[in-house]
Structure formats: structure tokens, C-alpha cells
Amino acid sequence: MPIVESTYIPPYIFRNYHISTIYAAKLRSIKPVPQTRERLKLEDGDFIDIDWSYANSCSSNKVLVILHGLDGNAQRPYVLGLAHHFNHHGWDVAAFNFRGCSGEINKLYRSYNAGASEDLNNVVTYILSNRKYETMAINGFSLGANLLLKYLGEGNDLPEELKAAVAISAPCDLYASLKKLEESRNWIYSLRFVTQLKKQLFLREKHFPEEITKKQIANCSNLYEIDELYTSQAHGYENALEYYEKSSALSFLSNIKTPTLLINAKNDGFLSENSSPIDIAKSNPNFYLETPEYGGHVGFLQNKDATYTEERALEFITYHL
């Protein structure tokens, strides 16, 4: 029954959902993390950029793969903070930029989505085939956390080097979590996502005018309409609802065989209640669930450089080596 009792008690100001979420995303100061970019060329003609940072003290035989969230990249504070923490403790880090998220539009009309586990599989296979790592772990955030959980539970032939995984603020039911984002208290986050994603679609229209029009993009007023217009169609789904149904990690959690920790804050306004499934954690000995009272969305700040989830990720992964 791996229900984990959380020890996270934040400073009083960070008990506020909005302050925790916004401060972590926009105001948190991160120590420099030198990164080196490597481009992985894919069989379909596209590419993925991996931003590497390395263990501070010595050559490492351990690597952590990090997956960012919606409209993110490998330079987001939550990615750099985790990379710094693991580098400091002897791990190399491969921060995986999803297609089209590394500052250069990808070559295909498709890009990334919450269920594109084939790209994660390509990254994992590439790293272990080309570098001499004996141990691998993976940490995903938000959309990347959902993708990670789906990858772990969908029956892939996972490498023996993959020892453990951690998912932070995972919207395990994509449609239900989308409806939470539409609530009035989340209008500022929803507006930002829509604005940024439409900017990316306008850029994509310049490269693929036969696939999508400026008028179609301009008419999108919420995330559902973007997923209906682009995400579902570009990635082979009939519509947005089929995309949510087939990509939500909730359907795959029971099958996870790799030791995996999910940390979802109870006050995370982005997540539906069933994104933290207690019944599955009680029945699957490999799926650990921790639900702190506070933390917001990818927040979990403390009166120290590392966040609570950065410390917990290292602790959980180290325990399962």
C-alpha cells in the first residue's frame, strides 16, 4: 500500500496556491547550470534537442532524464533546479526538449503532446545506446509527467538500466484537468497557455500553410479548441476527446512495474481529483502516491535552494537503485 505520508510544510506565504505556482515559474532564482546541446535525428525526418549537464565532481555512470511541461523547455526554472540538484549529487542530466520546444520549429507538422511516448522511448534508447550509463531515472513535470506515466505503464520493453521514475504535478486525467483550468480562478494561467500556444501555431502556419490557416488559429479561444484544431489532428486522433482519452496516464497507472513516485499537491488548481488515484496506489506496489496539502502546480518551495520535490526525487530514486 504505497501511499506516502508527505512531510512537506512550506513557508506560510507558499501555502497560497497562486503564489507558489507563479513564484516557482517566474521568480525563483536558480544557480547556473551549464548545458551542452545534442541533436537527436529521428527516423521520421524530425529532430529532438537534448540539453546535457554533468555531474560536478567526477565522471558519472548515472543519468537522469527530465521532461518539461506544456509550453516549456529545458531552460525552465523547475528543469534547471532539478538538474542542478542532481548534478551536485553525482548525476548527469539529459533535459529533453519536446519537438518544437528548443527554440527552433521542428521539421514536421506534428510537434508534441501529452501522450507522445514514442519520443521519450527514442530518447531513452538513444542515450543508452550511445553512452555508457549503468543507471537511468526519469523525472517528468505536468504534461511531461503524464507522458512519463503513460510510457511506464503502456507495455513498452523498458531497459534494465531504468531503475525509478518521479512524476510531479501530473494531470493524469487530461480532460478533467482541462476543465479545472477553465475555472474562473485559473483564468490567468489558461489565458497564458492559449496566448503562447497560438503564437506557436501562427509560426507553424508559416511553414505549413496547407495544413492550418491564420483564421482557424485566431478563432481558438481556449485550450480545448486548440486541441480540437491542432493537437488531435496533427497527431492522428479523431478529435480532442479521443486525444484526451487515449493519452491520459490514468488508464496506464495500474500496469506500472518500475518504482514510480507521483507527487500531486492537494491545492493544485490545475489537477482533477482523480489525477491522484489512491485506489491504484493501494493496489499497485510499484506506484507510490504522495499528496501534500500544499505545493500548487510545480511549486513545492522551501527556505532553501532546492524545492521539496527536488529533494524527494533524489531520495526516492536513490532508495530504489
Image (tube, rainbow, N blue to C red):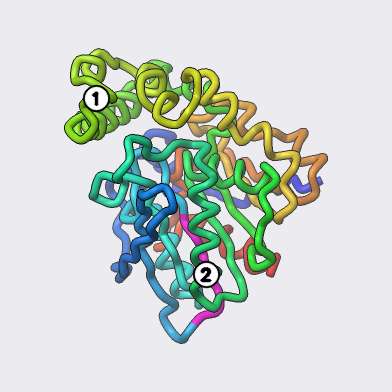
Magenta span: helix, strand or loop, mainly? strand
Distance, label 2 to label 1, CA atoms, is: 41 Å
Residue 294 visible, this angle? no
Residue 213 visible, this angle? yes
Residue holding disc 1: 210
- Above or below, 293 against 300 in this view is above
The quarter of the displayed image where residue 245 is located: top right
The quarter of the displayed image where residue 183 is located: top left
Question: Residue 203 location, x and y as percent?
Answer: 19, 34
Q: Is residue 60 left or right of residue 112?
A: right
Q: What's the amino acid at mark 2?
A: Val
Query: Dot 1 surroundings within 10 Å: few (below 14), some, or many (20 or more)?
Result: few
Q: What's the amino acid at mark 1?
A: Glu
Question: Residue 123 location, x and y as percent?
Answer: 49, 58
Q: Are marks 2 and 1 in contact (CB under 8 Å)?
A: no
- Badge nearest the viewer, 2 or 1: 1
- Above or below, 270 against 94 in this view is above
The image's mark for residue 29 is: none
Query: Dot 2 surroundings within 10 Å: few (below 14), some, or many (20 or more)?
Result: many
Q: Residue at the spot x=34%, y=29% of the render?
A: 189
Q: Which residues are magenta?
A: 60-66
In which quadrant will I find the C terminus?
A: bottom right
Q: Is residue 48 left or right of residue 289?
A: left
* Of the image marks 2 and 1, the number of the one nearer the N terminus: 2
53 or 183, nearer to the observer? 53
Residue holding disc 2: 63
